Amino acid sequence: MAIFRGVAYGNDPLRRIGRLGVPLSYTVLCTTGLAAEARIARRAGLGAVIGGGDHRRTVKVVEEAASAAECLVSFGIAGGLKPGLRAGDIVLSTEVIDDDRRWLSSDSLRLRISDLVEELGAIEGPVLGTQMALATKRDKRQAWRTTGAVAVDMESVVVARSAAALGIPFVVLRAIADPAARELPPAALLPLDEDGNPALGPVLASVLRRPKQLPNLLTVAREARQALQALLGPARALNRVLAGA
């Protein structure tokens, strides 16, 4: 199955026409953790798969879909590592790092993304990929000091590794949801369901067990909404750039 501008077609890898009849420079696949992120990507005309915040599941869904793509995008919200970033700030990156490796996208795409960074007023810099969320200010501060990454998420390393294996470019488009100074409460760290939605029952149970976390949880939820709302315009702009418009 090939994915074009958010529409699934049959087994015709030579077809390059989107749902509006616009030729694409790249067949694009976004990888997200949340269902809400995927909905935004699709509204912007981009195809998307959902990993649900689980590393193994993310690897599986990307492996199943990426062979039809010509560019992979890590898309959604992220934790801030660089001091001073605020909820809703946009990060655009063609560089991903983890504990022992660094991935760079293609030179040609990096130049196009740099122009888009300037257009959007986004932040450009490496993104740290992890398999678990960085929940504390101390962990975020240490990650910033040791890696220089401006943001952190759990999908970008899968995207970068898959793109390298396929020999195709990748991009990271993320909005900051929890800044470097924000501590994530226990309820915010609970696993999502397989569809990428918060598991409301366990979240409520966590709040009942530890009611003092509620004010911080509400702040985290508000900042996540800010981040999600900030994504649509940049996603449409990225789609335009990748389509060669």
Image: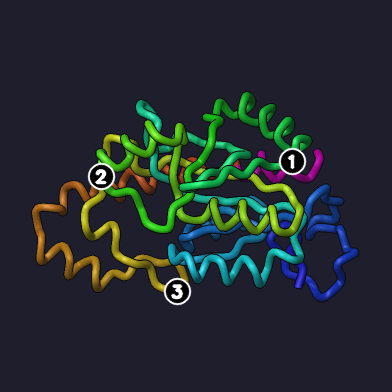
82 in magenta = no
User: Label 1: few (<14), some or many (≥20) within 10 Å?
Assistant: some
The residue under label 2 is 136
The residue under label 1 is 106
Q: Nearer the viewer, residue 151 or 203?
A: 151
Looking at the picture, how far across and down is residue 119, in whole percent? 64, 26
Looking at the picture, how far across and down is residue 161, in whole percent? 62, 55
Q: Residue at x 25, y 39 (%)?
A: 138
Amino acid type for the residue under numbered disc 2: Thr
239 in magenta = yes
Q: Is residue 102 left or right of residue 85?
A: right
Q: Earlier in the sequence, mark 1 or mark 3?
A: 1
Q: Is residue 242 visible?
A: yes
User: Label 3: few (<14), some or many (≥20) within 10 Å?
Assistant: some
Q: Is residue 60 left or right of residue 220?
A: right
Q: Residue at x 33, y 48 (%)?
A: 134
Dot 3: what SS? loop
Q: Nearer the viewer, residue 150 or 190?
A: 150
Q: Earlier in the sequence, mark 2 or mark 3?
A: 2
Amino acid type for the residue under numbered disc 1: Ser
Q: Quadrant of the C terminus?
A: top right
Q: Is residue 50 left or right of residue 146?
A: right
Q: Is residue 17 left or right of residue 70?
A: right
Residue 189 against residue 24 in the figure, above or below: below
The residue under label 3 is 194
Q: Nearer the viewer, residue 131 or 221?
A: 131
Q: Gap between marks 2 and 3, in whole Å?
A: 25 Å
